[in-house]
Image (cartoon, grey):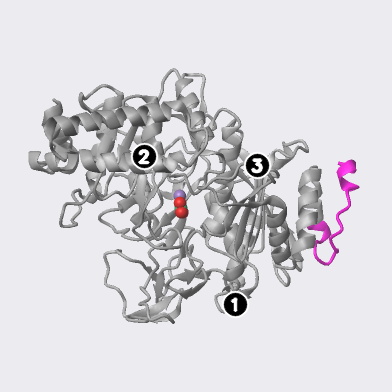
Amino acid sequence: MDGVKNLPIDIDSDVIDQENLDKLYALNNEHVLKIVNEFVSYCKPSKVTVITDSQEDIDYVRQKSIEVGEEAKLSIDGHTIHYDAFSTMSYHDQARDKTNTRVLVPKGEYASPWINTIDRDEGLKEILEIMDGCMRGNECIVRFFCLGPTNSKFSILALQLTDSLYVCHSEDILYRKAYEEFKKLNGSNNFFYFIHSAGELTGHPPVSKNLNNRRIYVDLQENCVLSVNNQYAGNSLGLKKLALRLAINQSNNEDWLAEHYFVLGVHPKGKNRMSYFCGAYPSACGKTSTAMLPGQTVLGDDIAYLRPWDDGYAHVVNIEQGLFGIIKDVNLEDDPFIWDAITTPRETIFSNVLIKEGTPYWIGDGREVPEKGANFSGEWNNGKKDKEGREIPHAHPNARYTVRIEELKNADENLHNPNGVPVHGIFYGGRDSDTMPPILESLNWEHGVFMGASIESETTSATLGAVGVRKQQPMANLDFIVVPLGKYLENHRKFGNSLERCPKVFATNYFLKNQDGKYLNGMLDKLCWVIWAEGRYHRDFEAIETPVGYIPKYEDLKELFNEYLEKDYTKGEYMEQFKIRVIKLLKKLERIETMYKKEDNVPDFFWTILYDEREKLLNLKEKYKKEEISPDEFL
Ligand code: OXD
Ligand code: MN
């Protein structure tokens, strides 16, 4: 301890007092001290506060966020509202900023068409200039968290410095506290760190002013991310999507996976068993609603780490303990668990919704939209337009709620299990209106990796930019992959092949439409796909082999729809949903081929599967002389 105490902390005593200094010294970690020292000197806050795991310290953050106006209390006890910056409908801070999120790449190292990179020296120079004095007049909070359950082989510790009380409060709901865990590091630098500043603030509530200077730079060399001039959690919270990028880098250099997965406990009726499934979907494509299916339990809805385990399975943990969920079309009927949690007293942060008389309203909440209220644009009334003449909706389509998972009635009992849970299956899905059937099982693990690698999805409001544009979304993780795609796919291949009990892989598509643009499936139909997949793992159902994977048999689905949804699922619906769209699938393969051809070192197994699938589809086309083949033809 003495050695560490002698380290120069040259922060003025009117910026950090003795009590806070002592909290830092107690960690006995020179790396933490150096980081705090260095970034306090760049960012120049007027005060530094160190938060331990004590309730008193944690309550301080929550209280302070309200005091500085980043959050305001709502009518229901524990509920607060936070707004992110808004200028116009197309210029705001209410979604992830992909353009200004860059990976710092040392000269001569890998650059990719899919990864937004910048030369490391140039990028550091740029962002440190922007960060010079960015916390002036504000308080910098130093906070310690754990990505994953504490005391677990899976987990990674994380240090966060931020001048946003909202960021810190959100992280407190979403992640496990770990000041005491840092002491167990024995002085090592085995942790990620994140420096965030909302930058100069404007207005009431205070929001980031200089969106044009918003930057999020990922430094793989230092295991750190610097983020400035933003508050939206996808840009600001170190532990969320910023840590995912660092973990993807680390896992691909070791023998595990860091994925954009929910984790769901599946409980089939009358079977006296349960199974765990992971699932990756681009944001706003049914991920949370799958994780929240009625009758099932939720372990996580966004990010997971997987490792091979000694029982032969891959095990998975949720690195979070809360939900930062999209609050659009969340209503009593479709999402009873979430509805219950966010409409009753408990610690909940709403962001970017409409507030009227202390009550939050969001798009698709099943209630009448108030004529006026307050939202991210200030005072709002029906028909209000932005500077460019675009109508401002009462709530943002990417508005969010932040709540702890254990507050939900369907929370899974293994949420904090340091050993994680065994993975029986994996779902991959995208927003695809015309190509893939609702569910398709891969022919084997490698084919499953191929299926995940060829997910396509139409863009949504969770990222800035146009919506509805079809894009390739490997493992729904492309926004976060920071290693060469070939390396990422090879790591997946090896991971599954090393397992004695390999998960089954399924592609799902909840967004198939008919020729008139009408969705072919109801919101809850996904429950039947999930139960079918669980049954396939346990060999309850046979399936029909097609060139692109296995599809369910009509009789099995008819029974499942009846048992789980009390719905009559007709043969006509089945035929329409599960026909093999040969031409559309061939076109998809072409797009996938074009994408991966731009990449070096894509593993051979990927090309073998792609060419094999193409040949089989061409043979079908030749044989049937039709664009679409009925499932019955494969019986
Ligand atoms: C999220 C996202 O918020 O992926 O989970 O954008
Ligand atoms: Mn996500």
Amino acid carrying mark 3 in the image = Glu
Q: In the rendering, at what x and y percent does residue 72 appear?
A: 52, 71
Q: Quadrant location of the C terminus?
A: top left
Badge 2 residue CB within 8 Å of ligand 2 = no
**Which mark is first along the chain, 3 or 2?**
3
Q: In the rendering, at what x and y percent does residue 434 appear?
A: 24, 48
Neighbour class for label 2 at 10 Å: few (<14), some, many (≥20)?
many
Badge 3 element? loop
Q: Nearer the viewer, residue 584 or 635?
A: 584
Residue at point 16%, 37% (across, down): 563
Q: In the rendering, at what x and y percent does residue 27 appear?
A: 77, 44
**Which mark is first along the chain, 1 or 3?**
3
Amino acid carrying mark 1 in the image = Thr
Neighbour class for label 1 at 10 Å: few (<14), some, many (≥20)?
few
The segment highlighted magenta reads: 1-20
Asked if residue 434 lies in the magenta stretch, the reply is no
Asked if residue 13 lies in the magenta stretch, the reply is yes
Residue at point 27%, 34% (across, down): 440
Q: Main secondary structure of the magenta part?
A: loop
Q: Residue beneath label 3, please?
A: 109
Q: Nearer the viewer, mark 2 or mark 3?
A: 3
The answer to whether residue 268 of the structure is visible from this angle is: no
Q: Residue beneath label 2, please?
A: 428
The quarter holding residue 465 reads: bottom left
Q: Nearer the viewer, residue 448 or 276?
A: 448
Q: Residue beneath label 1, please?
A: 202
